[in-house]
Every structure is written in C-alpha cells, then in structure tokens.
Image (spheres, rainbow, N blue to C red):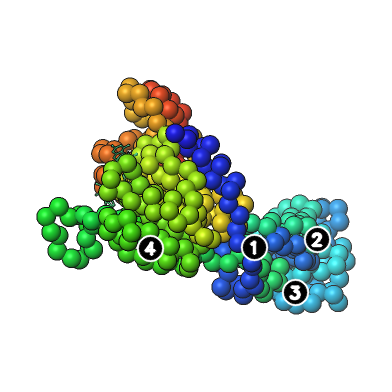
Amino acid sequence: MLDYHDALATLLAGLTPPAADETLPLSAAANRTLSRALPARVDTPSFDNSAMDGYALCDPDATRTAFCVTARVAAGDNAAGVALEPGEAARIFTGAPLPAGATAVVAQEDTRRDEDALHLDQPPRAGQHIRRRAEEYAAGGVLLAEGARLTPAAIALVASQGYAALPVRPRLAVTVFSSGNELAEPGAELLPGQIYDANRYQLIAWLAGFDVTVRDGGILPDDAAHTRAALAEASLASDVILTSGGVSVGEEDHVRAALEAIGTLTAWKLAIKPGKPFAWGQAGRARVFMLPGNPVATFVTFFLLVAPALRALSGEAAAAPRALPVRAAFVKGKLEPRREFLRARLRVEDGALLADLMAGQGSAMLSACAGADALVEIPPAATVAEGDLLNAYLINGAFQ
Ligand SMILES: Nc1nc2c(c(=O)[nH]1)N[C@H]1C(S)=C(S)[C@@H](COP(=O)(O)OP(=O)(O)OC[C@H]3O[C@@H](n4cnc5c(N)ncnc54)[C@H](O)[C@@H]3O)O[C@H]1N2
Ligand code: MOO
C-alpha cells in the first residue's frame, strides 16, 4: 500500500493542465489559474502621493511648526504646476499627488488652521505619510507567476496594473457518479436495505468550491456492463471523472474493473485511514478518481488527493494541501499501521492551537465530519500523548 505523501507526489507529478488557454475579462476570471506569468506594467505607486487627508509640508530641516498654506491638491488632480518652498504647505487628500518640494505630510487632526496659517504642535518627521513611487514594486518585475490562482486579492492586483483581460487555463469538466444498488435519491422513500446517496451530493458540493463544470452522472447500479458503459461515455466528455463506492474487494465492487476494461488503472490502495481503497487512473483524456464508498472516506480522499489533483489540472502551482502545527489535547494509545486523518475541533489556548478529537471517528460517521475544523494527521503506528505536535489540515471553512 502506498503512503499518502508518496501517493500525492506521484499523482501530482503525473498531472499537467490541458495545454489550451483562453483570455477572459477580469470580471469573469475569478478562481481561474493564470496560464502565463504577468509582468508589472507600472511602478506602484506610480507617483509619490499622500497617505492622509491633511497637509503636504515643505520643511527640509524637519524643524518648523508654522506654515503658510499656498495650494490645494485633491486625488485625481495634476500636481505638475504646484511647488512648495520651505515654510509652505498644500492642503492635500489621501491618494493625491505630492507637490514638488513636499518633505512630509501631516494628518489634518494633528494641525490647527487659521486662514492661511497652519500650526503644528511639533515638527513633522521627514517623509511621514508619503507613499513613494515604486515603494511597493517597480514596473518590469513579475507581478503574478504562471499558475497563480486568481483570488479576489490577485484580481485586485492585476486590475490595479491596468490589465483588462487575463490568460487563464480552461475550465475542467468533471463528471460525478455514485455506485451501489443500495443507494436512493434524497427525497425518495427508502425501501428496506436502502440508504440515501450522500456522496454524489457531497462531491458536487466540494466541486462548487472549484471553477469547474459539473456533470451529474447519477447512480451506477452494481452491474459490470452498465458501469463500463457509463464510464466510457463519460470519458468522452470529461476531463475528470469521480466515482464513489464499489472500489474495494467485494464481488459487487465493479468500478475498478470497469476502469481496467476501458482505460488504465494507475494505482489502488493507500495506507490511509479512512480511504484505503482509493484508486486513480485514466480513460481516454479523462482522469478517473475512484473514492471509497464510506462517506467520510470520500470526504478525506477528496480533500487529500482529488482537490490537489483538480488544482494541478487547473494549472495551479501550489496544489498540495498545507498543514498547520497543532498540539494534541487527546491521547491515543492504539497503534494503527495506516496513516490516520482524524476529525478534530481546534481551539486557541495560551496562543497555541489545540486539537480535540470529535466523538464518532468511524468512516461512515458523517456527523463528526460535518462538525470538525480539521483533519489531524497521525503518522503510521504512532501513539499520541497530550501536547504532542501534529499536522492539521483545516476543513469546512474553519477559522475563516
Ligand atoms: N473485505 C474487505 N472489505 C472492505 C475493505 C477491505 O479492505 N476488505 N475495506 C473497507 C474500507 S476501508 C472501505 S472505505 C470500504 C470501501 O468500499 P467501497 O469503496 O467498495 O464502497 P462500497 O462497498 O460500495 O460502500 C462502502 C460503504 O459506503 C456506503 N456508501 C457507498 N456509496 C455511498 C453513497 N453514495 N452515499 C452514502 N453511502 C455510501 C455503502 O453503503 C457501504 O456502507 O470497504 C470496506 N470493506
Ligand atoms: O479506509 Mo475505509 O475508508 O476506513 O472505511
């Protein structure tokens, strides 16, 4: 069985985004990934300007407390014709260009004004409240690297540089199937032996956090020919196919065999708990990820493997999940040969993050999963004492 970290590295190394790219207007590019690096077009700030509403002062020796107001500059004004001599001040506003000769800006609440006379309690510090041209970054450098995801902050950054359209990776088409004769649609009446399909809706909900087109493939019955045909059909129209269930060792587990019949099975079985029977491969151009049926195993393997794979296929440079160090607020004596990802709630105490385990760690127990802040990673065959440092991966939007 593969270790999780080796499996993730192998998986990501084998994934490259589709070569095509497209150009989208800024307003449609959120959450996409840049298909090439963007250079900074202009110095930022692009001119010296005021960080405060107040007065620009000319005081080369930083000794004066009395000034004469001789000019006014607002944001959007051209200050080219304005110059200050020692002892002169200009009324100025946040973002307004600094007049020639200004050595400092003072906030208006730190001044007293009487007609054109301006008084300060103490001389200004040279350079205070001035945002200098290019102090943040200069034109010509890399603004955003290839593979950067277009978060709201990244969109603001490129907009601030005047980019109106961006080169991005194409949107992936993802088809989602559930598998199993026991599954019924939520809303329907349950027959004896049936359970509601939780995983397809879980996966569709996960995918809402990615900029992908979702195709709902429905529920596959436990039937080899049907499963093969459905996967083959989906592979014609999908970049990614996700299935859950039917990937273990029972004779009603048909999904893995179906992939072997129509494509390639690359890997099967990871030394993780939950999630052991996870498998991946390829059918035509579609990458296929087969998630275990137990709903928490589906959750954990989506988070740990499929989400990074989707990021990599979307061209994102930083695809692997990032862990935070937390202190165990629990003990664990039982040795588990597989790497475990336990559902935990986090709290802050004395400046440290502490992890409390949720009650109900079974891989079918969704309630603990839905209430958790993090997956806490327990290395293979490890015991845990209170206070031990562990890796935690934030889930469910925790701490946001
Ligand atoms: N003899 C063995 N049996 C099992 C093994 C094993 O190694 N040897 N592994 C166990 C582990 S671990 C897991 S995880 C499960 C995964 O099996 P499958 O991926 O084949 O999933 P199923 O057998 O189809 O279902 C498992 C479980 O999950 C329920 N399920 C399935 N799909 C859904 C869904 N869409 N929504 C809600 N619940 C779902 C299903 O009813 C079963 O209870 O195998 C163990 N067995
Ligand atoms: O590995 Mo399974 O996912 O524990 O139930």
Query: CA gap, disc 1 to disc 3?
Result: 50 Å
Q: Tell me the SS state at disc 1.
A: loop
Amino acid marked by disc 4:
Ala
Considering the image in quadrants, where does the N terminus appear?
A: top left
Amino acid marked by disc 2:
Gly
Quick check: is the Cβ at mark 3 less than 8 Å away from ligand 1?
no
Determine whether 129 is above or below 72 in the image. above
Query: CA gap, disc 2 to disc 1?
Result: 26 Å
Q: Earlier in the sequence, mark 4 or mark 3?
A: 3
Query: CA gap, disc 4 to disc 3?
Result: 71 Å
> Between 291 and 297, which is closer to the camera in this rendering?
291
Q: Tell me the SS state at disc 3.
A: strand
Q: How many marks?
A: 4
Query: CA gap, disc 1 to disc 4?
Result: 28 Å
Q: Which residue is mark 2?
A: 140
Q: Position of residue 189 (x, y in %)?
A: 14, 63
Instruction: Name which quarter of the figure residue 53 lies in.
Output: bottom right
Numbered label attached to residue 229: 4
- The residue drawn where x is 62% and y is 52% is 317
Q: Tell me the SS state at disc 4.
A: helix
Q: Which residue is mark 3?
A: 73
Query: CA gap, disc 2 to disc 3?
Result: 30 Å
Q: Residues within 10 Å of mark 2 (few under 14, many from 20)?
A: few
Q: Which residue is mark 1?
A: 19
Q: Quadrant of ligand 1?
A: top left
- The residue drawn where x is 13% and y is 59% is 191
- The residue drawn where x is 51% and y is 37% is 5
Res 345 visible: no
